[in-house]
Amino acid sequence: MRLVTYEARGVRGVGVVIDDRIVETGFTDMLELIGGGPVVLEGVRSSIESCPTVEDARILAPIPRPHLIVFHSINFPSIVEETAGCEPPTRSSWFSKLPTSIIGPGDAIRKPFQDTHLDWEVELAIVIGKACSRASAEDALDYVFGYTVVNDISARDIQIEGGDIMLGKGADTFCPMGPAIVTSDEIPDPARLSVSTYLNGERVQHDSLAHMYYSVGENLAALTRLVTLQPGDIVTTGTPGGIGMNMKPPRWLVPGDVSDVEADVIGRISNPVIPGW
Ligand code: MG
């Protein structure tokens, strides 16, 4: 199933996308639907045909305010190869992005200062379906509700030169997410997906998740060794090569640019860049 959060006539809801329609599920909050577990999900699935179509819906981020959103650091050979001084990782490593950074499809990414070095990073995002602690790599996919796509927008000057990863990656609007959560039954093997970024329509990032150093299962095993994840929490998989920082000369996002990220099966979101604050 392809699940979206939408707003229609000022009211928020959770819908299922069927062809080019969105149908109501009766839920107003994706976290509530996910937290209901498999029984609730099956109830939604079995009643879809009789649910009304939503008119004039605007698609929002599928989970506009998750409790936890954890990002993987270096996880692709293609980014190690293009980044000066970057060595292949010897273990999974992580940082947390602020939930207040999330925006939806079409929302503007704000460039905070005129001299900010604003960069893009497409990542697959794993949406957790049930409480998960000390999972093994082999059974970790059993805890996955579904998958979506995020753009790990990064102010490199704040993140790297300033040494502040939380503000450099966690500022308002720095986490476009969407367009939908595709449930895990439709993506049995996430390693078969590819992810891409487009800058003003030109493809700048593209790689297969089969190339990751650490698979989705290995990532979740490493993280849940020390952290208990809950339904609706989000964990990303790292970004491949092709970021603006590594272009020669570097290419930063500026007002007027449009940054798109996409993944197979899940789809594409597009976000314009505007001057901030
Ligand atoms: Mg990243």
Image: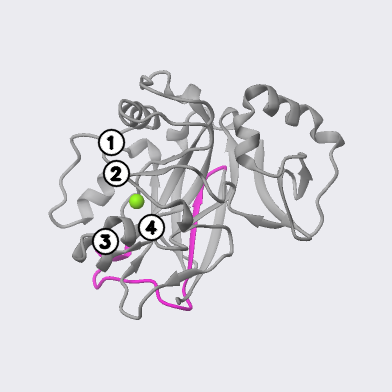
> Where is residue 244, by image quadrant?
bottom left
Quadrant hosting residue 3: top right
* Residue underneath mark 2: 76
Q: Which residues are magenta?
A: 242-265
Colour setup of the view: one colour
Q: Main secondary structure of the magenta part?
A: loop
Q: Comparing marks 2 and 3, which lies closer to the viewer?
A: 3
Question: On the image, numbered disc 4 is attached to which residue?
Answer: 170
Identify the residue at horizontal 74%, vertical 30% (top origin).
Answer: 45
Q: Which mark is residue 159?
A: 3
Could you give the CA–CA distance between mark 2 and mark 1, rounded to whole angstroms? 6 Å
Counting residues from the start of the chain, the first of labels 1 and 4 encountered is 4
Give the labeled residue for mark 1: 213
Label 1 sits on a secondary structure element that is: loop
Q: How far is the residue under mark 1 from the one under mark 3?
A: 23 Å
Give the mark nearest the N terminus, 2 or 3.
2
Relative height, residue 255 to residue 65 (above, below): below
